[in-house]
Amino acid sequence: MIRTVWRAAMALGLLLGLSGCGYNDFQRLDEQVKAAWSEVVNQYQRRADLIPNIVATVKGEASFEQETLTKVIEARAKATSIQATPELINNPEAFDRFQKAQGELTGALSRLLVVSEQYPNLKANAAFQDLRTQLEGTENRITVARNRYIKTVADYNVLARSFPTNLTAMVFGYPVKPNFTVQNEAQISTPPTVSFDKPAASAASR
């Protein structure tokens, strides 16, 4: 009887100790990070799925800049070649490659949309405009998902770095997680400089 009570007391003490050292918080935040990451991946995949239709529509414009189109195709291939598994969010190098690849795709798509403004046929193409609207909506969803992920990882990392919960992180294997950065995002979000002379000349020659 005394042994049973002692074991129960030990179990209760261990439970309270784990709770006090942040173990339960790690469990909760780790699951939240995984859920937030899943939403980020879903939105990036949604964008990738739109691109083939956008490319097919743009190809109908015979004089469209092939270099711009090729860069979008190549950037999509590079971005989708990286397997965005749950393990990736614990691998800083893999996470950085993923972020850079998605950033390159964002930049390539941005240029394509800017260049498309020079082509009246595309501007008047209802299918292209519908795809453009879907893409812009997806980019907004990506921003929301990324911001949620950034906030969740920041909360998790504060717990992983703080004392005494950092000791719990070491014992139970909860490392600091990589996060999205703003590196190069200003450059990516800046519309490229586009010369309107060439399309105008092409239009005049038609």
Image (cartoon, rainbow, N blue to C red):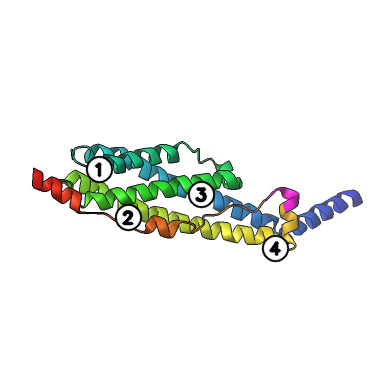
Q: Nearer the viewer, mark 4 or mark 1?
A: 1
- Viewed as shown, does residue 168 lie left or right of 87? right
Residue 65 is tagged as 1
Residue 164, how many percent across, how many down?
75, 62
> Counting residues from the N terminus, which is met first, the one under dot 4 or under dot 2?
4
Residue 162 is tagged as 4
**Where are the magenta residues, as a range?**
170-174
Along the viewing direction, whichever of 109 and 85 lies nearer the viewer: 109
Q: Nearer the viewer, mark 3 or mark 1?
A: 1
Distance between the Cα atoms at labels 4 and 1?
Answer: 52 Å
Distance between the Cα atoms at labels 2 and 3?
Answer: 30 Å
> Counting residues from the N terminus, which is met first, the one under dot 4 or under dot 3?
3
Residue 110 is tagged as none
Distance between the Cα atoms at labels 3 and 1?
Answer: 35 Å
Q: Name the residue at 46% across, 56% down.
A: 184
Q: Is residue 124 visible?
A: no
> Counting residues from the N terminus, which is met first, the one under dot 2 or under dot 3?
3
> Counting residues from the N terminus, which is met first, the one under dot 1 or under dot 2?
1
Amino acid beneath label 2: Pro
> Counting residues from the N terminus, which is met first, the one under dot 4 or under dot 1?
1
Residue 145, how many percent across, how many down?
44, 54
Q: Nearer the viewer, mark 2 or mark 3?
A: 2
Amino acid beneath label 3: Trp
Is there a contact, CB below 8 Å, between mark 2 and mark 3?
no
Residue 37 is tagged as 3
Residue 96, how many percent across, how many down?
54, 48
Residue 44, how many percent across, how many down?
41, 46
Q: Quadrant of residue 25?
A: bottom right
Amino acid beneath label 4: Ser
SS at mark 4 in the image:
loop
Task: Identify the residue position indicated by label 2 in the image.
Answer: 192
Distance between the Cα atoms at labels 1 and 2?
Answer: 14 Å
